[in-house]
Amino acid sequence: MFLKKFVQPGHKYIRYINTNVFNTQTIHLYNREEEIVKNTKKNKDNIELGFKGVNSIGVIGWGSQAPAQALNIRDSLKNTYIDVNVGLRHNSKSVDDVEKNGFKIENNQLGEMYDVVRKSDMILYLVSDSAQVETYNELFKHIKPGATLGLSHGFLLGHFDAHNIKFPDNINVVMVAPKGMGPTVREKYLEGSGINSSFAVLQDVNGKATENALAWALSIGSPYVFETDMRKEYISDIFGERGILLGGIYGISEYLFREYNNMCKTKKQSYEKSAFNITGTINRYIKSYGLLDVYKNMDFEDKKIFSNVYTNTYYVAKEILQEIYDEVYSGNEINSVVLASKRFNKYPIGKIDTTDMWRIEKNHRNDFYEHRIQPETAGIYIATMMAQIDILIENGHNISEIVNESVIEATDSLNPYLYSEGISHMIDNCSITARLGARKWGPRFDYQLSQNNVLRNSIYTPSQGMPDKKKLHQAYILMEKFNQHPIHKCIETIKNL
């Protein structure tokens, strides 16, 4: 439908970023080359120049990304000629919070959204996905010709593609998509580390779109900015949150919790060995040392357990992930979010935190025990992450996007939050698009893992006196592929930028 199948993984190419303002750097990933923009001192000093022609930036909305981005941009543009203002819908409940963060109505830093749109040279359209679908027509009536419309997600383009709708042809349309939640974008900015971002240019009517997008990405504190295609971004983003980032970890945790509990572990221990182990010990290890070292540093018995569970899980997870990818790619998943949004008044989204597992999570937040890496848990989680990586490679996404969407966003942003606040809290309070996706696909992961008995179905257990040679061969092939996978070197390269 939208994407051409990609060049083969061994094909070497380079993606050039068309900028005259910012310095670029070439990195080598998977026998390919990509140009990136790093947040060096020189590039940081050129942010104002990248916004040339932009006297006023309007941040529309105050949801997850808007507060972090508005505050980061304001801080980065301090002592410049560029104004940063916030626009909200009439009677918005967010007015008090916006004012608490220093955007004052009396100083014209906060206003009704369309008033802010009319006076802004660059509009960051950061309302929810469903709100964008509801309000884009009115927004287009008020946007200035030659202005730059900025999105942090390609969802609206996905909706437009499905319904043959076009953006106005007299404006720039760009995207900057931080690979982390809004609160993390702000937290990491204040720490001086930042969250990586992808950027894309869909329309450039005046030759300023790329510079505007890069200036935006650097001003929110992105340490590393890579180029993508807006269509590829919304596919990988929606796919990823239904996969390993939220839906997958939800379903995996439910399955493991039940299995550990059936092995005579208490419910508290079962939570610690499943969800808490993934978001805590396993996540910290992946973040520090990568996916492969989780396995390499296990003892012999744990390696045997890991490889057994990894082998049982990989194709089971990949089957679900391919279905998710196809649903997103076809436009079905985006349309289902739009349709669900229309039902909310009659059928509000329920919470998942009433079942045994999530009650344990809430009631024992301050007294969980930190277990060593559980090989069963690591085997299922890493097999699912690797299956997601392979689906994205097979469907032509660039390596920076794959590493950031499938690994770094999990290890640096989402999992630490899930560890601190809980998986159920995140799924019950994240964006509508993500909440719907996690609820839809999480139970599918749980059911498929359970149906295929991935934890208990041992390839090493003799059947009629002999192990299953076919399964042993499949395990050997899969573990060799895991050990030799080029993604490990790519993760290391990007982590060390």
Image (cartoon, rainbow, N blue to C red):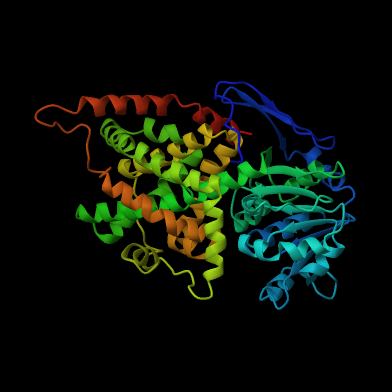
Task: In the displayed orientation, state which residue is furthest to the front.
Answer: 164
User: Which residue is nearer to you in this view: 360 or 254?
Assistant: 254
Image quarter where the C terminus lies is top right
| Left or right: 68 as drawn, with respect to 454 | right
Q: Is residue 370 visible?
A: no
- Which corner quadrant of the image does residue 69 belong to? bottom right
Residue 233, horizontal then vertical, whole percent = 62, 44
Residue 342, horizontal then vertical, whole percent = 56, 68
| Left or right: 215 as drawn, with respect to 379 | right
**115 relative to 199, above or below:** below
Number of numbered markers: 0
Residue 417, horizontal then vertical, whole percent = 51, 56
Q: Is residue 340 visible?
A: yes
**135 relative to 298, above or below:** below
Q: Residue at x 84, y 51 (%)?
A: 170
Residue 408, horizontal then vertical, whole percent = 55, 42
Image quarter where the N terminus lies is top right
Task: In the displayed orientation, state which residue is furthest to the left.
Answer: 464
| Left or right: 276 as drawn, with respect to 465 | right
Q: Residue at x 36, y 37 (%)?
A: 315
